[in-house]
């Protein structure tokens, strides 16, 4: 094991690693992120190793499990270098064909290539796939290129060169000034300038300081930090060490969710590898700078994503926020100066040191620099992680990268910023993505969650869902959050059940105002956003629920009814067989009828009715169609018997 005690030793070892690798040797990279593992990536990796050995190619082909490249909708993803052939949805059964055709015969397996739905053409290379074309991948780009468990792979692509530059060619003040000049804003939600936060800690009189990675990613549908920790842990570790050097901290922490076992495994391995190479510990690279890192697993409380709650938890106490009379970068962990940034923020630091602040700030808007990673999920054709330059429009993200809304449905809104974010409607789709722009639209950047909603989504129910989530996750320490959210949840639930009444909207607004003004931490202060943003853009849906007892999206179960259109029913019997409540009457060749007293409004009949018939109709708050309501006498196509509709 090499001990890299000088920058020269690091460069020499890096050159040796590169020289030993044949750039023309085929390398099969298989995504081994948590999402692809759930889809069978481990079996695919094992199959490749077995097949390569069976065909006598062990010395001629390299195989590695890598991090997530982002296209989660089509995993497991396999990329073959140096040609950069990208295969999607690969299974273990496909492996023999890939090895025999692509590796040995240099032929493509057409069915595994991306099929562009617009052009109808197959995309061979990753860069040719529409999902990737409009992205600008600087933080995520190496996920599919390196073995996430190998420090040598990270070193071979230039890893730890930024650390060497910072420790031996720059003063701590110069590092701080470079980060300040880049205008890197925290990617965890608030968007506070990282350099200013670091400066506050550096200038604090207390000599003992800490740097902390916030990897407590709890937003529903968000997995950006997890993918970085799993796929390229050394990039975050390198950024953390540089941050420690800049503020004169000698101890760092990773605060990681208990639900991220693979991320915890990989970051612990990265720390051990860095220590064994002399890149972590005493006298790093002969600079005289000492630094150690500790990994702490959180218990999964959403509130621990808030800075003071996280630090309280890190101290071994219940994760509750504390009043911010003094910012945590002055009095944080154990009441000492503590810089807390999220995973993506730290991963940007080595890039800024290596390429310069001017390079970083050349991308983005006036107030939001660099790129941002989003988890693009929901009612969207291409789900996954996307990294785009700040300033790209929501429309381009959703349609150029995400491929639009599936099944011909209409776009309705996009929810950004996690549970405390807001919903942005269709007429705001050309909004540029940036910290200030999203806030002005009634939402927020948050950590990067982006949930797309289509025409079948009830916006009142969306608000109820997120308020309910935040009610459960509230620590309960302050009344406005604990009691206010509970009452908002109760009122919104009643509205979606047809029990809303005049004055509910005004009461919800009053509760929201109180929570925003009087809550102790950011969870309570931002919690009303889902309600306020949906009310701002979709007030008519609230009024329809309250005044007409109608859900315009036909989504709220207790406000809808299902009926069978006698003019379309072909008496196939599928709905009756699938109905879990046994609420559908009807014999073979006779029109079927839904017993409204037994019906639970589950919608199974609506979902299973053959599309060529579409006999089951969904109704909310409107009069039942006349033929059904009046019970007209109907005769089925193949039976002379008459049937009546209830």
Image: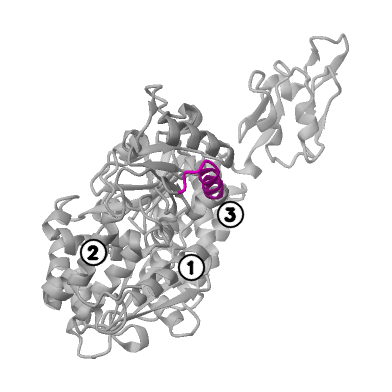
The residue pinned by badge 3 equals 493
- Within 10 angstroms of label 1, few (less than 14), some, or many (20 or more) residues? few
Mark number displayed over residue 265: 1
Q: Is residue 593 visible?
A: yes
Between 324 and 31, the residue placed more toward the observer is 31
Identity of the residue drawn at 47% across and 68% down: 264
Q: Position of residue 212 (x, y in %)?
A: 34, 75
**Label 1, label 3: how far apart the Cα atoms are:** 41 Å
Dot placed on the residue nearer the N-terminal end, 2 or 3: 2
- Give the SS element for disc 1: helix
- Within 10 angstroms of label 3, few (less than 14), some, or many (20 or more) residues? many
Identity of the residue drawn at 27% across and 79% down: 329
The residue pinned by badge 2 equals 350
Dot placed on the residue nearer the N-terminal end, 2 or 1: 1
- Relative to 407, is 513 above or below? below
Q: Position of residue 581 (x, y in %)?
A: 79, 41
Mark number displayed over residue 351: none
Question: What range of the chain is rendered magenta?
Answer: 44-58
In screen coordinates, is 570 left or right of 84? right
Q: Position of residue 546 (x, y in %)?
A: 54, 46
Quarter of the rendering containing residue 574: top right
- Give the SS element for disc 2: helix
Magenta-drawn stretch contains 50: yes
Quarter of the rendering containing residue 271: bottom left
Q: Position of residue 137 (x, y in %)?
A: 29, 48
Between 144 and 478, the residue placed more toward the observer is 144
Q: Residue furthest right?
A: 641
Identity of the residue drawn at 20% across and 90% down: 205
Dominant SS in magenta: helix
């Amino acid at each position: 094991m090499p001990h890299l005690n000088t920058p020269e030793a690091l460069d020499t070892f890096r050159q040796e690693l590169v020289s030993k690798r044949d750039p023309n040797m085929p390398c099969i990279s298989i995504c081994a992120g948590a999402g692809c593992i759930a889809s069978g990536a481990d079996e695919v990796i094992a199959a490749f190793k077995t097949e390569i050995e069976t065909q006598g190619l062990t010395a001629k082909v390299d195989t590695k499990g890598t991090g997530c490249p982002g296209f989660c909708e089509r995993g497991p993803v396999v990329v073959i270098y140096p040609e950069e052939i990208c295969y999607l949805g690969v299974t273990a059964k496909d492996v023999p064909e890939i090895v025999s055709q692509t590796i040995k015969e240099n032929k493509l397996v057409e069915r595994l290539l991306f099929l562009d739905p617009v052009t109808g053409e197959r995309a061979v290379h990753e860069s040719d796939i529409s999902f990737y074309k409009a992205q600008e991948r600087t933080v995520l780009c190496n996920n599919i290129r390196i073995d996430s468990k190998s420090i040598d792979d990270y070193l071979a692509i230039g890893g730890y060169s930024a650390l060497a530059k910072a420790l031996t060619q720059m003063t701590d003040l110069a590092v701080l000034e470079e980060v300040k000049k880049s205008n890197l804003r925290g990617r965890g939600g608030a968007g506070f300038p990282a350099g200013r936060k670091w400066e506050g800690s550096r200038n604090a009189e207390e000599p003992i300081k800490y740097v902390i990675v916030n990897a407590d990613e709890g937003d529903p549908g968000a997995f950006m930090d997890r993918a970085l920790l799993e796929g390229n842990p050394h990039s975050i570790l390198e950024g953390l060490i540089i941050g420690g050097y800049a503020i004169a901290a000698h101890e760092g922490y990773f605060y990681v969710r208990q639900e991220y076992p693979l991320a915890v495994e990989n970051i612990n391995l990265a720390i051990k590898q860095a220590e064994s190479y002399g890149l972590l510990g005493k006298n790093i690279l002969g600079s005289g700078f000492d630094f150690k890192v500790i990994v702490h697993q959180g218990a999964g409380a959403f509130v621990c994503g808030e800075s003071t709650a996280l630090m309280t938890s890190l101290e071994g106490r219940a994760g509750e926020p504390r009043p911010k009379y003094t910012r945590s970068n002055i009095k944080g962990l154990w009441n000492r100066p503590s810089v807390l940034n999220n995973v993506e923020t730290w991963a940007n630091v080595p890039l800024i040191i290596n390429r310069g602040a001017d390079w970083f700030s050349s991308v983005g808007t006036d107030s939001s620099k660099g790129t941002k990673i989003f988890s693009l999920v929901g009612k969207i054709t291409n789900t996954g992680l996307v990294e785009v330059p700040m300033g790209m429009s929501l429309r381009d993200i959703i349609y150029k990268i995400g491929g639009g809304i599936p099944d011909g449905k209409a776009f309705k809104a996009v929810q950004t910023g996690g549970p405390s974010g807001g919903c942005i409607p269709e007429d705001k789709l050309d909004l540029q993505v940036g910290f200030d722009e999203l806030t002005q639209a009634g939402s927020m950047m948050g950590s990067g969650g982006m949930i797309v909603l289509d025409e079948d989504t009830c916006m009142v129910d969306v608000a109820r869902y997120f308020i309910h989530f935040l009610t459960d996750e509230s620590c309960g320490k302050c009344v406005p959050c604990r009691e206010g959210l509970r009452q908002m949840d109760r009122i919104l639930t009643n509205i979606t059940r047809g029990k809303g009444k005049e004055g509910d909207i005004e009461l919800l607004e009053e509760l929201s105002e109180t929570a925003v003004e009087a809550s102790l931490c950011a969870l309570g202060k931002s919690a009303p956003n889902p309600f306020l943003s949906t009310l701002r853009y979709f007030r008519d849906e609230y009024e329809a629920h309250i005044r007409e007892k109608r859900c315009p999206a036909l989504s709220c179960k207790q406000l809808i009814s299902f009926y069978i259109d006698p003019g379309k029913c072909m008496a196939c019997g599928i709905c009756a067989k699938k109905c879990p409540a046994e609420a559908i009457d009807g014999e073979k060749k006779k029109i079927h009828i839904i017993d409204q007293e037994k019906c639970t409004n589950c919608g199974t009949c609506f979902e299973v009715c053959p599309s060529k018939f579409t006999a089951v109709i969904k109704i909310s708050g409107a009069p039942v169609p006349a033929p059904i309501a009046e019970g007209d006498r109907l005769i089925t196509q193949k039976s002379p018997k008459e049937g009546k509709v209830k």
